[in-house]
């Protein structure tokens, strides 16, 4: 069976590495000549919205998936006319627009931060009146890793924020003084089976994920069940197949959904070592129509992203229990170049080793 | 860094899959057009003793290793003139000849079954007189998976055995009524660091490994230390770099060395899930000059080989905790097509799941 992946980045690379042991083959569609996944998959070069490239890519594939949520809907539909595409293209519509996404969560009974659509300067003022400050103005589409958003600390910041983002469809989100950021990763198979990973605790810096710990400490069975229930509502409404990540704010015992990613997710990288079946293998199993693997954690894992630069490989590997994953990408400030996971039987040991790594990364 | 692997079979495939996360690239030398490793590594086609193929293969590599022990010594030397070759070619001389190998063990103070060289029909009679029956007549070179050997239950079997194997350099080995077969896998880095995996219990059928359990049950610290000591003697004498496997017979509390493989080994496949660092990653780390990873076991693992046929992938993956590794090879009786490992926190659970798998394989 040959699996096509739209996008040739590190997520595609890790999907392919997880899928070869199952006897699958991989092809990626990626316009750039240098693709992180290019070492381990056939690389078809072409733009994501080029019909000829899409047709050449689809030729001979058994199933298509994607590794980023900004796949053009028309491209997904074109491919879906020839070969099954999972997750379902409808998931793209939800994930590509912050307003659609938040309304989708609300309609499922999943709480979110308060929000208002902003289409004009007047609407920004009205939304600010409604939500108060601090608040965050965001582009509805194409934001990632903290890009396309401005924090408004008072109404006086409205002019500057409008100058930066105005003219595009926007959303104003009320500020939530959350205790911490969590994410829930779940996977649904072609026949409707669902498995969910334990909640992950995530730490961001300047909008980029820097560190995840799984299972998140201090999570009781009720909170885990609540997160699983939310995930299941999204999965079932979309008749979803594959891994889905939902980022959550924990706030006074409640979980507010922030956004979802219809793909494998950076906050699930720990699962390569830290779960019985990794998110990558489970995504591949799901889209290939195979039974899902158990998501049971194996010990406690802490994952650090390698952002902008990669410390000495020798030094990282010298940390007991460190598992290094490099993406074969050229260095650039703010770019995710790899990650390192330490796994240990208990949280204290994992944290001690994570400290050693953090010192190397500092 | 680009690593060359002589041989494009499943061991090369799993070495490459383990090495990409470290940012390494791979090239294999393999005469056959269909190479198990070909999906995940650049494939240079050529015979192992073709100087032009060897030169084309070596071009641009940083280090060369191999995945089978019958690499021609002259080829290893030719490559070693251009690029570091690990494990050291001297290890090939030892591993390629059962007589040299057994003498090498004895010289290191490592016990073996009794043996006699056999170069003629007369020498076979003399050796039988010396060792008694039952005994096993084996070719000194190119035997594997039970091929090239004949069991002599009485002296009357000598004619038939000579007819089958005579004319080649042979060795007669006294029969050891061993309790069980174990193996010790160890790894030595470029700077002399050594790590050893726990002893593995192996079960063979018709000369082919069918099942391994790790850590082997009923191994006390003394037995593990003895095996580690033997491994270390071999590693240090050869100034070895990489993974080394030694097959052992356990006999009345003693360990008799049967043979060694200067490469990753089938009885170490469990380590992909069952050890903190797999034999494949540690071999790659060693030959690339990187620090070794800890060999600590993670739970208890049972590995089954898939020989000749592959059961339904769906059925295998439906077994809780089953990890399937297919080699992308066409089916043929007696051919190793993949393996499945079940790992669990405790031995009882691992064995229960292994039973489920064994039922599928039967």
Image: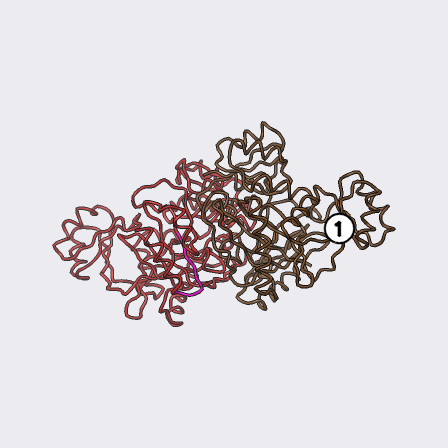
Chain colours: A red, B brown
Structural crowding at the residue carrying mark 1, measured as other residues with C-alpha within 10 Å and reported as few (<14), some (14–19) or many (≥20):
many
State whether residue B350 is above or below residue A328: below
- A39 or A71, nearer to the observer: A39
Please tell me in which quadrant of the rendered image residue B303 appears.
bottom right
Residue at the location (18% across, 59% down)? A134
Q: Main secondary structure of the magenta part?
A: strand
The location of residue B218, given as percent across then percent down, is: 61, 66
User: Which span of residues is magenta-colored?
Assistant: A340-347
Q: Which residue is mark 1?
A: B173
- A66 or B359, nearer to the observer: B359
Residue A355 as seen in the image, left or right of residue B102 = left
Is A118 one of the magenta-colored residues? no
State whether residue B96 is above or below residue B57: below
The location of residue A120, given as percent across then percent down, is: 19, 50
The location of residue A349, given as percent across then percent down, is: 40, 63
Residue B354 as seen in the image, left or right of residue A151 = right
């Amino acid at each position: 069976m040959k699996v096509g992946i739209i996008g040739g980045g590190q997520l595609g690379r890790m999907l392919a590495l997880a899928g070869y042991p199952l006897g699958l083959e991989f092809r990626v569609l990626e316009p750039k000549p240098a693709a992180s996944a290019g070492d381990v998959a056939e690389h078809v070069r072409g733009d994501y919205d080029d019909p000829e490239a899409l047709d050449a890519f689809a030729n001979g594939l058994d199933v298509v998936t994607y590794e980023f949520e900004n796949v053009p809907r028309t491209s997904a539909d074109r491919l879906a006319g020839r070969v099954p595409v999972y997750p379902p293209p409808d998931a793209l519509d939800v994930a590509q627009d912050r307003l659609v996404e938040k309304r989708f969560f609300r309609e499922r009974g999943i709480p979110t931060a308060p929000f208002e659509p902003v289409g004009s300067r007047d609407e920004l003022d009205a939304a600010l009146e409604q939500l108060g400050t601090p608040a965050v103005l965001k582009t509805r589409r194409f934001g990632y890793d903290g890009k396309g958003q401005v924090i408004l600390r008072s109404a006086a910041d409205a002019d500057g924020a409008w100058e930066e983002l105005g003219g595009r469809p926007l959303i104003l989100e009320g500020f939530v003084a959350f205790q911490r950021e969590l994410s829930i990763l779940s996977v649904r198979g072609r026949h409707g089976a669902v498995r969910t990973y334990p909640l992950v605790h995530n730490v961001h810096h300047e909008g980029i994920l820097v560190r995840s710990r799984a299972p998140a400490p201090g999570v009781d069975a009720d909170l885990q069940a609540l997160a699983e229930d939310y995930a299941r509502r999204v999965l079932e409404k979309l008749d979803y197949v594959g891994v889905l990540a939902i980022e959550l704010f924990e706030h006074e015992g409640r979980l507010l959904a922030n956004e979802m990613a219809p793909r494998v997710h950076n906050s699930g990288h720990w699962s390569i070592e830290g779960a019985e079946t990794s998110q990558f293998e489970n995504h591949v199993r799901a889209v290939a129509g195979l039974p899902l693997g158990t998501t049971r954690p194996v010990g406690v894992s802490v994952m650090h992203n390698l952002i902008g630069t990669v410390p000495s490989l020798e030094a990282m590997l010298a940390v007991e229990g460190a598992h290094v994953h490099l993406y074969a990408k050229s260095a650039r400030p703010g770019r995710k170049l790899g990650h390192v996971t330490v796994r240990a039987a208990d949280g204290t040991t994992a944290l001690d080793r994570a400290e050693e790594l953090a010192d190397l990364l500092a």
